[in-house]
């Protein structure tokens, strides 16, 4: 590979062919409209195309990778559309306007959590997402109640989607090899419209603000109505990480709905 990976863009290119094959076999891609986030040099792109999708839109920030990606466009001119720009500034809702999207990507570690949370807010926009992320991020998103990694993003991910870790990927599968392992996530939407995403997200942020503090103490400085909670004594000695996503929904509904 002649391209020098850019540290500031979090570039680690997945080259392991067996891992690439496994990713595109997680869900059926044949005859589907797909968006790939961060195609890089196009290794995963090529495997996606082997599954014969209906169309593929790729979004890449690094213009120096154009020399690799335009070769793919030349090979599949009627199927592939390359867009060069910052995914954080591109509204993917504009693509396939009347269709729910399939989104795939080996996400840069420095933006993975932000992007996933952004997409979770709009469950009607996507059929499913397959993302490669830092293993630590995957562990946080899929953590169960009471586990070390369980926190606000765990609750958000598990309330607004069906999320699971499919498999882990060793660092040696990438160039350059990162200092950490990675994981592949499958995220399927849950059409949960009873609670608006942003207010609930803000509520969770405050709930987990001080993990060592008891739940009531964390929230009473923000919400005077905390006393409205039924069986208040049940909450006095518990911390936020001891509540399940379902319990957070019930607490939020009691306080605000």
Image (tube, helix red, strand yellow):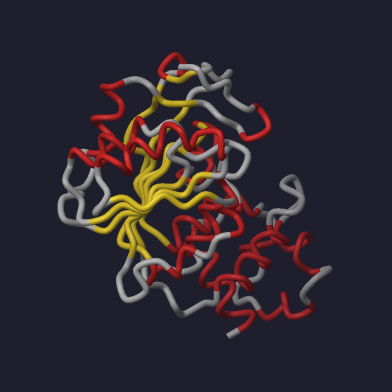
On-image quarter of the C terminus: bottom right
Q: Is residue 93 above or below residue 78?
A: below
Q: Answer left or right for 17 relative to 50.
A: right
Q: How many marks?
A: 0
The residue lying at 48 percent from left, 61 percent from top is 120
Between residues 142 and 222, which one lies in front from this camera angle?
Answer: 142
Q: Residue furthest top?
A: 172
Q: Answer left or right for 104 relative to 54.
A: right
Between residues 238 and 125, which one lies in front from this camera angle?
Answer: 125
Residue 228 in picture, x, y percent from top left:
68, 81
Residue 97 in picture, x, y percent from top left:
37, 74
Q: Residue furthest bottom?
A: 257
In which image quadrant can residue 23 be found? top left
The residue lying at 55 percent from left, 53 percent from top is 87
In which image quadrant can residue 167 be found? top left
Q: Residue furthest right?
A: 221
Residue 77 in picture, x, y percent from top left:
27, 49
Q: Answer left or right for 54 relative to 114.
A: left
Between residues 254 and 54, which one lies in front from this camera angle?
Answer: 54
Q: Is residue 202 above or below residue 13?
A: below
The residue lying at 46 percent from left, 17 percent from top is 1
Between residues 109 and 210, which one lies in front from this camera angle?
Answer: 109
Residue 204 in picture, x, y percent from top left:
64, 62
The residue lying at 52 percent from left, 77 percent from top is 195
């Amino acid at each position: 590979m002649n391209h020098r990976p850019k540290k500031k863009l979090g570039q680690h290119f997945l080259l392991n062919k067996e891992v690439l094959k496994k990713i595109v076999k997680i869900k059926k891609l044949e005859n589907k409209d797909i968006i790939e986030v961060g195609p890089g040099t196009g290794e995963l792109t090529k495997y996606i195309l082997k599954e014969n999708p209906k169309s593929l839109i790729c979004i890449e920030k690094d213009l120096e990778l154009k020399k690799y990606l335009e070769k793919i466009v030349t090979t599949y001119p009627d199927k592939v559309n390359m867009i060069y720009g910052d995914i954080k500034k591109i509204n993917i809702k504009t693509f396939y306007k009347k269709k729910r999207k399939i989104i795939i990507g080996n996400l840069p570690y420095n933006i993975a959590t932000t992007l996933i949370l952004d997409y979770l807010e709009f469950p009607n926009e996507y059929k499913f997402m397959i993302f490669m992320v830092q293993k630590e991020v995957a562990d946080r998103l899929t953590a169960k109640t009471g586990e070390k990694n369980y926190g606000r993003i765990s609750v958000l991910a598990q309330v607004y989607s069906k999320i699971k870790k499919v498999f882990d990927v060793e660092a040696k599968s990438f160039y350059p090899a990162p200092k950490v392992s990675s994981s592949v996530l499958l995220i399927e939407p849950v059409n949960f419209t009873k609670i608006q995403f942003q207010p609930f997200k803000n509520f969770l942020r405050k709930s987990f603000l001080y993990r060592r503090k008891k739940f009531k103490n964390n929230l009473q400085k923000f919400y005077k109505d905390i006393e409205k909670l039924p069986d208040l004594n049940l909450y006095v000695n518990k911390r936020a990480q001891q509540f399940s996503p379902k319990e957070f929904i019930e607490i939020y509904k009691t306080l605000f709905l």
